[in-house]
Image (cartoon, grey):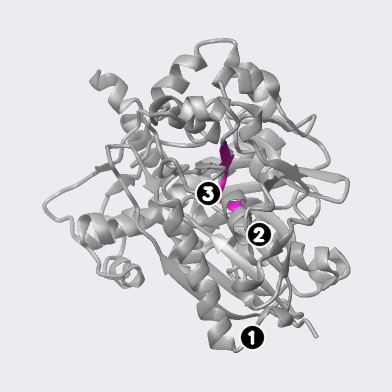
C-alpha cells in the first residue's frame, strides 16, 4: 500500500525532501545547502547541476533513512524558488549558463529604461506584475543576448527554458516532461494571467522564442513519472507550485480573504482573492495562487527581497554569529535596539517600494552600540518590512486585517512574531508545523493521486501551535514606525543619487 507523499522543496539556499503521511504529519526531512555565487555586485547565481544534485541527494538520503522505495509513495509534489531562470540545451540536457536567481539585479537598468514607456502599464495589465528585474523575462533575454551562440540556438529551437520546477521535472522524468504550472508561469512576466497563455506580444518585446517555453499545467496535474532509477520504480509526479503559493495552500487559506506571510530567505505576504483577479493600487502584485481542475484562484502578493537572509548575512557577511540559531540569544542580550535601525536593502527593495537603486544601511550607531543591538535591529527589520506590506494590503482592501497566518524558518523566533503582532496590530497565528510550503505541494500531489479526497479532508489536519496578540502601547509602536520610515527614505535611490 502506498502510504506516503514525497515533497521536494527546492529553495534559494538549500534543497529538501520531506516524507508526509496520511495525517499530514512530516515524518522525516533531509536537507542540503548549495553554493551561492555572486560574480558581480547585485548578481546572484546558482549552478543548476548543483541544484539537481542536492535535490537528488536529499531524496536518496531520506529513502535510505526510512528504508522505503517507490512502491511506498503515492505521489511526488514539487515546490520551488520562483522566478529563478534556467536555460538548457535540448539535445545535451546541460545548462548553457548558471541559473540567474530571483534576487539578481543585473537587468535592473534595462527594466528601468523600459518602465519609462507604455510597456509598464501593459505588462501590469497582462501579467499582474511590476516591470522589474525580479521576474524571469529579462533574465532569459540576458542569457540569450550575452551567452555566445545562445540567441542562434534559441531561434533554431535548440534551447529550453524553465523555472526550477520545470528543470527538476525535466530531469526527474528523463526529459519526457517539459512543463510548469500556472503559479510559476505567472511569475515570468511573459504569461498572461487572464488568458492563461504565454503572451506573444510580451515574447516579442523580450525577444524570447515560444519554442523555449514549457507547457503550462494546473498546479494539481499529471507531470509524468520520475524514472525508476531514482526510487526503484516509476513514481507519479502529481503537483508543481511556486513556494509562496504552496505555503498559502499549505496554510489552508482556501477561501477568499485569507492570507499568510512566509519568513524565508525573503518574506512573502499572499492574500487569496478567490476567482477574482484584483489589481493593487499600492505596488503589490497580482498573481495566480493555483489552478485545480478548471478553477483558477488568484492572489495579491507583496515581496520582501531580504527577510531571513539578513540573519544569514549576519553569519556569513559580518561574522557576528557562527550559526543562525545564535541570533535569538544575541537579541535577548539587549533590552531594545538601542536606537539602531537596519534597512536590509542588500539587493534593492521590493514591495511596496520597488527600488533597485536602494542599498542596505544601518542608522543610529553610537559608541554604546553592541552586536546585540545590530542583531536585534536586523531581526526587527524583517517585521518592519512585513508591516509595510500589510499596510499596503490594508489600503487595497479598504479595511485592516485581523489575523496573519505565518510560516517559514524565521517564524519560529518568538521575539520576531511578537514584534510583528505589535507592529500590524493583529493576531499572528503560527501553526504546529512551519513546513507549510512543503505541505502545500504534498496536499496538491495527494489530491492528484487520490491519497486525500478533498480540501475538506485537508482542513481537519491543521493545528495551531501559538497565537501572538498585540501587547505594546500604540504610541511606542508609532514612534518606531516613524523612525523606520525615516531610515527607509534615506536608503532609497542610493545608487541613482550616486550617479
- In magenta, the rendered stretch is 159-165
To which quarter of the image does residue 3 belong? bottom right
Q: Name the residue carrying label 1.
A: 68
Please give left or right for residue 413 compared with residue 245 in the image. left
| Inter-mark Cα distance, 1 to 3 | 29 Å
Q: Residues within 10 Å of mark 2 (few under 14, many from 20)?
A: many
- At mark 3, the secondary structure is loop
Label 1, label 2: how far apart the Cα atoms are: 20 Å
The crowding category of the residue bearing disc 1, from other C-alpha atoms within 10 Å (few below 14, some 14 to 19, many at least 20), is some
- Label 2's element? loop
Give the residue at x 50% y 79%.
61
- Quick one: label 3, few (<14), some, or many (20+) residues within 10 Å? some
Marks 1 and 3 in Cβ contact (< 8 Å): no
Figure quadrant of residue 202: top right
Q: Which residue is mark 2?
A: 173
Look at the image and tell me in which quarter the N terminus lies.
Answer: bottom right
User: Which is more N-terminal, label 3 or label 2?
Assistant: 3
Mark sitting earlier along the chain (1/3): 1
Q: Which mark is residue 93?
A: 3
Q: Nearer the viewer, residue 55 or 274?
A: 55
For the C terminus, the image quarter is: top left
Q: Taking 396 as reference, is 318 above or below it?
A: below
Residue 161 in magenta? yes
Residue 93 appearing in the image: yes
Question: x%, y% of residue 356?
Answer: 40, 30
Amino acid at each position: 500500500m502506498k502510504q506516503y507523499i514525497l515533497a521536494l522543496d527546492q529553495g534559494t539556499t538549500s534543497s529538501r525532501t520531506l516524507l508526509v503521511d496520511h495525517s499530514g504529519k512530516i515524518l522525516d526531512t533531509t536537507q542540503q545547502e548549495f553554493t551561492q555565487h555572486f560574480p558581480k555586485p547585485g548578481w546572484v547565481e546558482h549552478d543548476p547541476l548543483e541544484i539537481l544534485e542536492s535535490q537528488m541527494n536529499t531524496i536518496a538520503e531520506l529513502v535510505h533513512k526510512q528504508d522505503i522505495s517507490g512502491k511506498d509513495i503515492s505521489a511526488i509534489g514539487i515546490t520551488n524558488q520562483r522566478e529563478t531562470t534556467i536555460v538548457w540545451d535540448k539535445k545535451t540536457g546541460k545548462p548553457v549558463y548558471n541559473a540567474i536567481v530571483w534576487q539578481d539585479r543585473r537587468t535592473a537598468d534595462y527594466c528601468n529604461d523600459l518602465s519609462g514607456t507604455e510597456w509598464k502599464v501593459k505588462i501590469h495589465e497582462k501579467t499582474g506584475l511590476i516591470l522589474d528585474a525580479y521576474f524571469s523575462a529579462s533574465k532569459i533575454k540576458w542569457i540569450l543576448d550575452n551567452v555566445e551562440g545562445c540567441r542562434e540556438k534559441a531561434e533554431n529551437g535548440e534551447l529550453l527554458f524553465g523555472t526550477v520546477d520545470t528543470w527538476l521535472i525535466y530531469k526527474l522524468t528523463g526529459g519526457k516532461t517539459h512543463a510548469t504550472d500556472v503559479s510559476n508561469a505567472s511569475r515570468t512576466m511573459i504569461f498572461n494571467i487572464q488568458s492563461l497563455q504565454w503572451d506573444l506580444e510580451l515574447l516579442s518585446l523580450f525577444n524570447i522564442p515560444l519554442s523555449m517555453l514549457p507547457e503550462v499545467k494546473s498546479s494539481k496535474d499529471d507531470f509524468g513519472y520520475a524514472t525508476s532509477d531514482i526510487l526503484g520504480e516509476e513514481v507519479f509526479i502529481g503537483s508543481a507550485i511556486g513556494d509562496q503559493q504552496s505555503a498559502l495552500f499549505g496554510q489552508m487559506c482556501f477561501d477568499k480573504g485569507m492570507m499568510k506571510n512566509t519568513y524565508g530567505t525573503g518574506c512573502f505576504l499572499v492574500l487569496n482573492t478567490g476567482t477574482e483577479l484584483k489589481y493593487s493600487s499600492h505596488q503589490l502584485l497580482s498573481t495566480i495562487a493555483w489552478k485545480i481542475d478548471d478553477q483558477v484562484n488568484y492572489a495579491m502578493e507583496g515581496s520582501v527581497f531580504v527577510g531571513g537572509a539578513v540573519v544569514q548575512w549576519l553569519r556569513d557577511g559580518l561574522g557576528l554569529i557562527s550559526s543562525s540559531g545564535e541570533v535569538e540569544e544575541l537579541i535577548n542580550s539587549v533590552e531594545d535596539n538601542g536606537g539602531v535601525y537596519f534597512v536590509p536593502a542588500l539587493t534593492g527593495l521590493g514591495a511596496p517600494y520597488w527600488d533597485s537603486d536602494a542599498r542596505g544601511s544601518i542608522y543610529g550607531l553610537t559608541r554604546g552600540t553592541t552586536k546585540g543591538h545590530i542583531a536585534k535591529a536586523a531581526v526587527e527589520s524583517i517585521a518592519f518590512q512585513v508591516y509595510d506590506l500589510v499596510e499596503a494590503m490594508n489600503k487595497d482592501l479598504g479595511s485592516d486585517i485581523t489575523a496573519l497566518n505565518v510560516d517559514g524558518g524565521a517564524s519560529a523566533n518568538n521575539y520576531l512574531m511578537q514584534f510583528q503582532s505589535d507592529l500590524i496590530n493583529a493576531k499572528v497565528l503560527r501553526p504546529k508545523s512551519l513546513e507549510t510550503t512543503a505541505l502545500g505541494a504534498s496536499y496538491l500531489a495527494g489530491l492528484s493521486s487520490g491519497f486525500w479526497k478533498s480540501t475538506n479532508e485537508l482542513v481537519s489536519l491543521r493545528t495551531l501551535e501559538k497565537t501572538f496578540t498585540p501587547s505594546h502601547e500604540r504610541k511606542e509602536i508609532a514612534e518606531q514606525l516613524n523612525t523606520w520610515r525615516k531610515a527607509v527614505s534615506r536608503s532609497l535611490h542610493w545608487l541613482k543619487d550616486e550617479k
